[in-house]
Amino acid sequence: MLDPASHLPHRFPFLLVDRVLERQVNVKVRAEKLVTFGEPYLQGHFPGRPMVPGVLMLEMLAQASAFLEEALDDQPVFLAQVVDARFKVPAFPGDHLVLEVAPEARFGSLLRIHGTVTCEGHVLCSAKLLLKKGSALEVPA
Amino acid sequence: MTPDQIDDTAPLFGDGLGLDSIDALELVLGVEQTFNVKIEDEVSGLRAFRNVDSLTAFIAEKQAP
């Protein structure tokens, strides 16, 4: 079983992949994240009505995408662009989230992926993301 | 900006047209879809993407029978 923490530099409270369920290099990754009441951000988002912020679902997809790469190392994957993101249903404590990502295009260290976050077969979030592996994106002024 | 406002010899990235590395992927995909020309790697991409003239030459060379 692949240990996400050994290949992602993220740590609590920002390691947002619990397990990698399926990994086909450059084709598809399926991973999972269990949402618990212990997530620090749920205290304030929102008091008495906890739900996972949509941007964190994008971060989950970005972290899961690191496992599409052939070389597994602890090089971070940075978000470079959110091309399209749809949040259809919120995620709540107790939800078992399945993160599915697949590459759409690649050029150099840039990778565009399509991903979905589902819970019990329902799509909560779908997005296209542009990611850059290695160093943070340097955009010329 | 219209196509005729683009200087064919001005750099596409940085000071010239001002594209950034995020645009590079879009450009790669656009060239592939429109001209059916694959840009295999970063090295050939950087050569092709110097300016409009170099991109035109690159596509013409790849399309030559």
Image: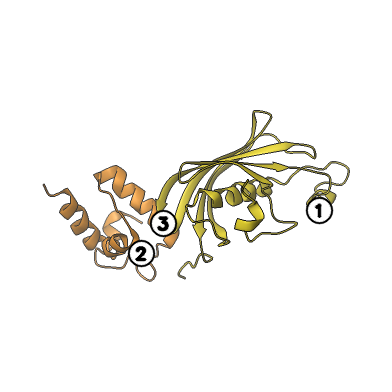
Q: Residue at x 53, y 56 (%)?
A: A72
- Answer left or right for A7 relative to A36: left
Binning the other alpha carbons within 10 Å of mark 2 as few (below 14), some (14 to 19) or many (20 upward) gives some
**How far separated are the C-alphas under marks 1 and 2?**
44 Å
The chain under label 1 reads: A
Q: Residue at x 21, y 53 (%)?
A: B59
Kindly state the secondary structure of the residue where label 2 is placed. Answer: loop
Kindly state the secondary structure of the residue where label 1 is placed. Answer: helix
- Front residue (pair A134, A22): A22
Residue B48 at x, y percent in the picture: 26, 61
Total tally of numbered discs in the picture = 3
Binning the other alpha carbons within 10 Å of mark 3 as few (below 14), some (14 to 19) or many (20 upward) gives few
Q: Which residue is mark 3?
A: B23
User: Residue B17's mark?
Assistant: 2
- Residue A39 higher or lower than A126, as above or below: below
- Disc 3 vs disc 2: which is toward the camera? 3
Q: Counting residues from the N terminus, which is met first, the one under dot 3 or under dot 2?
A: 2
Which amino acid lies under the numbered mark 3 shown in the image of this protein? Answer: Asp
Q: Which residue is mark 1?
A: A40
Query: For chain B, what colour was chosen?
Result: orange
